[in-house]
Amino acid sequence: MIGVVKHASKIDLGEKSSTSMLSTAPTVTEPFTAGRSAPRLLFDFGVMASLMKPTVLDQPVLDFGSGTGWVSEFCARMGLQTVAFDIHGDLQACLENRAQADRRIDEGLLSFAHGDGHAMPFEPGAFGHLLCYDTLHHMHDYPKVFAEFFRVLQGGGRGIFVEPGARHSTSPETVAFVEAQKKHDPSWIERDVVLEEIDQIARNAGFTAGLCIVPMPHPLALQSYSMEAWSRFRDGDVLERLRLTDQLASLNYWDRVIFYVDKPK
Ligand SMILES: C[S@@+](CC[C@H](N)C(=O)[O-])C[C@H]1O[C@@H](n2cnc3c(N)ncnc32)[C@H](O)[C@@H]1O
């Protein structure tokens, strides 16, 4: 049985708790078959896991905006006590189906809470880490959620973010998606994540060192080199090096951003 976190709102299991969902539901199969790119999700999770801070790994992890709970599942696979948090009401079914689908997942490590990220139902300092995957850009009020991030993290804790970048809201795919989504959920928003703006908001919230930005290649746009080109790169060929660094500089601002914030001790 997956535990519910104290103060979490009551949830309605409905038909989603049925074990008949096990083999087909995206809430079990994501990150592998839910229509989003498995290589991207796996790569990005690997980056988030690499950025975790060894000194607070014995403290609970908050999976902020956990969706189907795939990040929570992977944290539990790593042996981390994890709380899935989301505004949608299906978390218990999502997590229970995951745990039932694979005996390697220790469901004692998983719990959940429903609520709004702008006012979370957690005690101050409840978490050593918060992981925010593809969720910050849905928040209506960035300063409010950063104040909440600061409150629920303990001193020395870390928030790790993987988000779309500074031109997300105006990309044709996003505009089309928002149009379609409005029919089901008029409150759905897709915002830009502009590093300078978030850096200032994070500092104002108390993360005094600001953002630590981690530029990474995109798993769906990896560069490759012939042996000759790689030898030229290694020998210092300026054009070969610019090809990589220009891509990293643009990608890690406009298209996808990875960063973390540390709460001072
Ligand atoms: C794009 S999904 C990402 C979900 C998950 N992190 C993943 O990668 O699959 C964004 C999630 O944010 C949640 N969300 C949106 N607004 C929220 C809010 N105000 N508070 C908490 N969660 C929210 C949505 O329900 C959704 O599950």
Image (cartoon, rainbow, N blue to C red):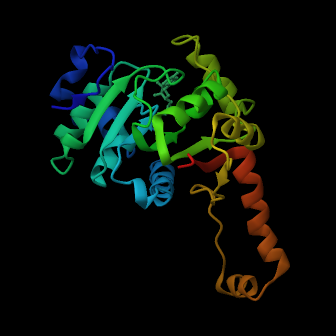
Question: Who is closer to the viewer here, 81 or 84?
Answer: 81
Residue 207, position as x, y percentages in the image: 63, 43
Q: Is residue 223 left or right of residue 107?
A: right
Q: In this picture, is 47 found above or below 256?
A: below
Q: Residue at x 42, y 38 (%)?
A: 63
Q: Residue at x 26, y 38 (%)?
A: 110
Q: Residue at x 53, y 13 (%)?
A: 185
Question: Who is closer to the viewer here, 133 or 8?
Answer: 8
Residue 111 visible? The answer is yes
Number of numbered tags placed on the structure image:
0
Question: Who is closer to the viewer here, 263 or 162?
Answer: 263
Quarter of the image with the N terminus in it: top left
Residue lying furthest right: 238
Residue lying furthest front: 265
Residue 198, position as x, y percentages in the image: 70, 38
Q: Is residue 160 left or right of residue 249?
A: left
Q: In this picture, is 87 found above or below 155?
A: above
Q: Residue at x 44, y 49 (%)?
A: 38
Residue 241 placement: quadrant: bottom right
Residue 230, position as x, y percentages in the image: 68, 82
Residue 68 visible? The answer is no
Q: Is residue 165 left or right of residue 258?
A: right
